[in-house]
Amino acid sequence: MADRDEIRSRMQGNGVEFLLAQFVDIHGAAKVKMVPAACLDDVTDVGAGFAGAAVWGVGQGPHSHDMLARVDLDSYTPLPWMPNTARFAADLFVDDDPYPFCARTNLKRVLADVRKQGYVFNVGMEPEHFLVTRNEDGSIAPWDPDNVDSLAKPCYDFRSMAPAMAYLQDLTTSLNQLGWSVYQTDHEDANAQFEVNFAYQDALTTADRITFFKMATSQIAKKYGAVATHMPKPFSDRTGSGLHIHFHLADADNGKCLFDDASDTRGLGCSEFAYHFLGGVLQHARALCAVTSPTVNCYKRLQLGAGLYSSRSGYTWTPAFITYGDNNRTQMIRTAGPGHFEDRTVSAGCNPYLALAAYVAAGMDGVANKTDPGDPNRGNMYERPLSEVRDQGIRILPQSLWEALEELRHDAVIRASLGVIADEFIDLKTKEWETYDRQVTPWEVNEYLTFF
């Protein structure tokens, strides 16, 4: 825990005059109160007050006692776009007790159990996002101020990336000033889509940073006339945005990665311990999907047939089958190096606190039960006929939010990872699906108006 006097000294040195006490709602959206820097003691010891019924999914009504957001001093983060202000991630309390509907508090609960078993869950997340503009009619278009980002395959293209370099450099410099160790940025597979990669940390720190990253992109993009969106699939004919996670468990005492093993008979350089964790993730993948892809829109990027010719670039880069393999991006989980797994299905639209709590719970269930994930799949899943996939017993990720929620309802491990949030999550997301399912879309009008 950071020393309060040290934080106060850093605030003075950084010229910080105001603080944001920040938590997230059930969707992962940042919620804040701003207080003068002189109130540091108050927001640390007592907390900034919130009316919970005004926030989605925190289990409160208009009659409920105030939620108090108590800041975590370790999360001190000066705002690069507003230098006199700093953000602190906060945990929610009600009547002086930790509030179990707080997604951050829930993740800390799950991680504490993992640590009791002797492990630390280390995670790197890759936040893909779009820069867009809004038209007068409310529609959106890729942000393209120089009218050059129009290639069918724009990934890594210099001319397509050039107009965004000032934005990306501004963002990179800002994050590196915070000590995040950004090591690369690139133009992704869709027009006006970008990715910024920074060093991995423990799961709680990474979730805090992903939340702040979304806050930062929203404000820095405005300087360049763009709207930064982490919507998973804003364009039907372009690749969607993921929040790919790279993960391993480390020894809580010495920090040593427990996932690598040069003698691996499967040839991927991974330990049996790692494979058991992986087996748990794969076993619970269908229910886990409800938490890692928690919106209606997420399932527009997890569709079957998401291979050749399914987007302008030729691929969606989002697997729909529950498989793992070597360094192979058509698998749900690829082995990017010895002891280094990457899950490519996680959506940019997830709440990182809930997603990581569910993820590590699934993996730890595999460890407890020594779940065998089977042999790695080394084929191209995009080209494999669906009949062959089914004959081999390969399971498919849910193809809608409704289907995923049905899996979550019956998965005790993933439900338990969400604590009391589980019922609230399922109820809210069921209503989201039902609201969506009642809509009559322009496609339906065009397709059926004079069809019969």
Image (cartoon, helix red, strand yellow):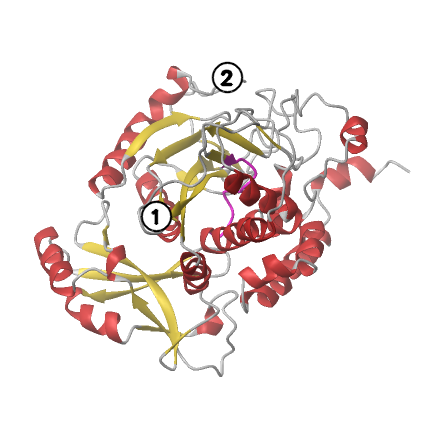
Q: Does residue 182 belong to the magenta stretch? A: no
Q: Picture coordinates of residue 364 (x, y %)?
A: 53, 52
Give the residue displayed 9% in from the left and 58% down from the top. 9
Which quarter of the picture shows residue 195? top left
Circle 2: residue type: Leu
Q: Does residue 350 belong to the magenta stretch? A: yes
Q: Picture coordinates of residue 163 (x, y %)?
A: 34, 23
Q: Which residue is mark 1?
A: 209
Bounds of the magenta span? 342-351
Where 119 sits versus 431, above or below? above
Disc 1 on helix, strand or loop?
helix
Residue 222 in view? yes
Name the one closer to the observer, 271 or 76. 271
| Quadrant assignment for the N terminus | bottom left
Would you say the residues marked 2 and 1 are in contact, meaning their CB atoms lie under 8 Å apart? Answer: no
Marker disc for residue 97: none
Q: Which residue is mark 2?
A: 151
Q: Comparing marks 2 and 1, which lies closer to the viewer?
A: 1
Give the residue displayed 24% in from the left and 70% down from the top. 44
Which quarter of the picture shows residue 276? top right
Name the one closer to the observer, 365 or 72. 365
Q: What distance separates the C-alpha of mark 2 from that of mark 1?
A: 32 Å
Which quarter of the picture shows residue 306? top right
Name the one closer to the observer, 226 or 358. 358
Name the one closer to the observer, 372 or 96. 372
Disc 2 on helix, strand or loop?
loop
Answer with left or right where residue 389 lies relative to residue 203: right
| Quadrant assignment for the C terminus | top right
Sort mark 2 into few (<14), some (14-19) or many (20+) by Cα contacts within 10 Å.
some
